[in-house]
């Protein structure tokens, strides 16, 4: 790095950067932390381009993208809650607007060669908007047995009970994948199918009801638990998972827009403003949390729509509920405190509750 480059970089940092930073804050309507890796941006023999290139490559597309989001209250709310920091650097050698931006855990990283395709501001703005609006990806399990170990089973009996909980949630309407197992009896006979129930009889004791799938037909197999020797859980990586496309992951902004529409429907039901929002300060950034909250929002509105069909129930809501909040927690729950009706859902689909179940939880609170 030569003397000319050092002087030009210092001039930019002390004079131009504060102006660009202020323009970014004005666009976002809050102070956006910006970290610049100057050492990766500075290149020999390019000092004369710093003032022209760096604003066009990094700041102009960023400011324009932020302005687009900040056009309405929901967009501003999304930015304020989601955008924690902007990092500007040149490490990966990107020169394309479609691949230079990434957004992970609230950090927007702009990684682009500082003197390539300088005038492609629009493409870079579009690239920033795409990553901010994109749905996060579900975290793949690093352990094929992870979902099974999450059941915290300690033996055949507790494993069956865990599989039975999944089966019951699936039967209730949560779009879970069926838990397939292979059961081996003490005689050496084995059966493969879906756990459906555990039957109890005073004279015969407890038996496992297994649904075998053979071509287009299904067989019901009843196995006395006293004769059970081994239990093999198949496809443990998808255990407790959802059917394909049953509950798609959405972006944070999409979730907030959906809640706004559902809130308008709730206002109509209550005949007054009753905000339906995420619990203030609640984390809603991971794909797992966003998927769970989107499912919960549908079920909450269904529960409240059904509940308000009864005039007395609707009146109780009007008297005691001022707002409705949603969040993700360790377990599913419904609480009412100081006018806030809060619905909590587990990230894990096996803990999701349906509209009818949420409706049943309301009368004791009112």
Image: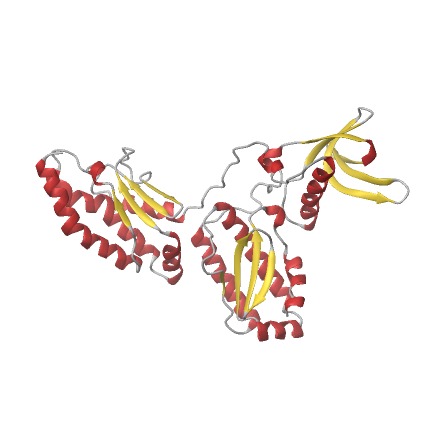
Residue 224 visible somewhere in the drawing: no
- The residue positioned 70% from the left and 33% from the top of the image is 181
| Residue lying furthest top | 188
Query: Tag count in the figure?
Result: 0
Q: Residue 79 appears at what percent x and percent y?
A: 36, 55
Q: Looking at the picture, does residue 333 appear above or below residue 250?
A: below
Q: Residue 253 appears at what percent x and percent y?
A: 43, 54
Along the line of sight, the residue nearer the viewer: 213 or 353: 353
Q: Residue 184 appears at what percent x and percent y?
A: 76, 28
Along the line of sight, the residue nearer the viewer: 236 or 230: 230
* Image position of 7 (left or right of 86): left
Q: Residue 48 is drawn in which quadrant?
A: top left
Q: Quadrant of the C terminus?
A: bottom right
| Residue lying furthest front | 154
Along the line of sight, the residue nearer the viewer: 333 or 75: 333
Along the line of sight, the residue nearer the viewer: 226 or 70: 226
Q: Residue 198 appears at what percent x and percent y?
A: 78, 42
- The residue positioned 11% from the left and 43% from the top of the image is 8
* Image position of 258 (left or right of 57): right
| Residue lying furthest left | 4
């Amino acid at each position: 790095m030569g003397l000319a480059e050092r002087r030009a970089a210092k001039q930019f940092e002390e004079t131009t950067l504060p102006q660009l930073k202020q323009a970014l804050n004005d666009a976002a309507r809050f102070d956006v932390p910006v970290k610049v890796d100057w050492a990766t941006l500075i290149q020999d023999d390019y000092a004369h381009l710093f003032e022209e290139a760096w604003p066009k490559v990094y700041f102009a597309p960023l400011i324009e993208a932020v302005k687009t989001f900040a056009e309405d209250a929901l967009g501003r709310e999304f930015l304020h809650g989601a955008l924690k920091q902007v990092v500007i650097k040149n490490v990966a050698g990107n020169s394309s607007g479609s691949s230079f931006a990434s957004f992970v855990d609230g950090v927007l990283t702009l990684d682009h060669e500082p003197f390539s395709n300088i005038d492609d501001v629009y493409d870079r703005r579009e690239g920033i908007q795409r990553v901010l609006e994109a749905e996060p990806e579900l975290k793949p399990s690093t352990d094929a047995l992870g979902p099974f170990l999450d059941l915290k089973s300690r033996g055949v009996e507790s494993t069956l009970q865990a599989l039975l909980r999944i089966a019951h949630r699936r039967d209730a309407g949560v779009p879970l994948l069926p838990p397939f197992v292979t059961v081996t009896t003490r005689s050496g006979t084995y059966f493969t199918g879906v756990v459906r129930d555990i039957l109890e009889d005073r004279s015969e004791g407890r038996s496992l009801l297994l649904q075998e799938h053979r071509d287009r037909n299904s067989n019901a197999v009843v196995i006395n638990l006293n004769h059970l020797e081994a239990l093999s859980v198949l496809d443990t990586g998808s255990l407790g998972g959802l059917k394909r496309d049953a509950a798609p992951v959405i972006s944070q902004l999409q979730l907030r827009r959906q809640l706004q529409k559902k809130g308008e429907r709730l206002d109509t039901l209550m005949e007054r403003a009753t905000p339906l929002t995420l619990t203030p300060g609640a984390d809603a950034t991971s794909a797992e949390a966003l998927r769970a909250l989107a499912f919960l929002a549908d079920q909450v509105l269904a529960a409240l729509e059904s509940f308000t069909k009864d005039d007395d129930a609707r009146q109780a809501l009007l008297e005691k509920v001022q707002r409705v909040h949603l969040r993700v927690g360790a377990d599913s729950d419904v609480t009412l405190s100081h006018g806030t009706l809060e619905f909590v859902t587990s990230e894990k689909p096996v803990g999701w509750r349906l509209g009818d179940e949420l409706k049943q939880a309301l009368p004791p609170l009112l």
